[in-house]
Amino acid sequence: MENIEENIQKTLNSLDSVEKPSLSPLMADRIWKIAISDSKIRLEETWDLRKKMVWLTGIATVVILNIAFLSWNSLENKKTNSSNEMSLTSLYFDSEIDY
């Protein structure tokens, strides 16, 4: 039993002489550079993702507007054919003028 207590005391006394490790300045610079380069890569990745989202949103908007215009145009043609009103082209171009 005394032997175990002596070993415990020796171990605890040896821990008192252990010094706190210090970081070398070169190592701190390397870690800092790695952290900055990783953040730049992440920023570029998010920027690329944002660009793609803007393009997709723009294309979707154009497609939706084209579909809406085509459906509106077809509804106007149905109204025009049924009630003999002016067609869509005659709204923009005067058919009575000789060009």
Image: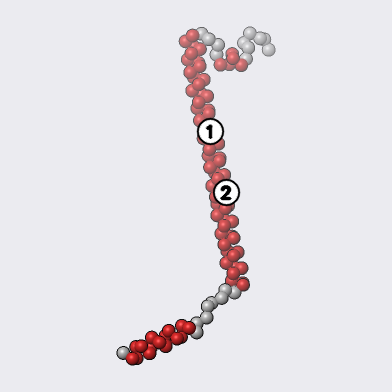
Q: Tell me the element at label 2.
A: helix
- The residue to which callout 2 is attached is 47
Identity of the residue drawn at 47% across and 15% down: 78
Mark 1 vs mark 2: which is more N-terminal? 2
Instruction: Tell me the amino acid under the disc marked 2.
Output: Trp
Which one is in front, 78 or 50? Answer: 50
Residue 99 sits above or below residue 7 on the image: above
* Residue 74 spot, x, y in % from top left: 49, 19
28 versus 72 height, above or below: below
Colour treatment of the image: secondary structure
Location of residue 36 (image quadrant):
bottom right
> Which part of the image, by quadrant, shows the C terminus?
top right
Q: Is residue 77 above or below residue 56?
A: above
Residue that lies at the very extreme toward the bottom in this rendered image: 2
Q: Where 13 falls versus 61 (above or below)?
A: below
> Which disc is residue 61 wearing?
1
Give coordinates of residue 10: x percent, y percent: 42, 88
Q: Quadrant of the N terminus?
A: bottom left
- For this orientation, the residue located farthest to the right is 99
Q: Residue at x 61, y 16 (%)?
A: 92
Query: Dot 2, crowdedness within 10 Å: few (<14), some or many (≥20)?
Result: few
Say whether marks 1 and 2 touch (CB < 8 Å). Answer: no
Nearest to the observer: residue 4 or residue 55: 4
Question: In the image shown, does 6 or 65 lie closer to the viewer?
Answer: 6
Mark identifier at residue 24: none
Q: Position of residue 50 (x, y in %)?
A: 55, 45
Gap in Å between the C-alphas at discs 1 and 2?
A: 21 Å
The amino acid type of the residue labelled 1 equals Thr
| Secondary structure at numbered mark 1 | helix
Q: What residue is shown at x 61% (from left), y 72% (from top)?
A: 26
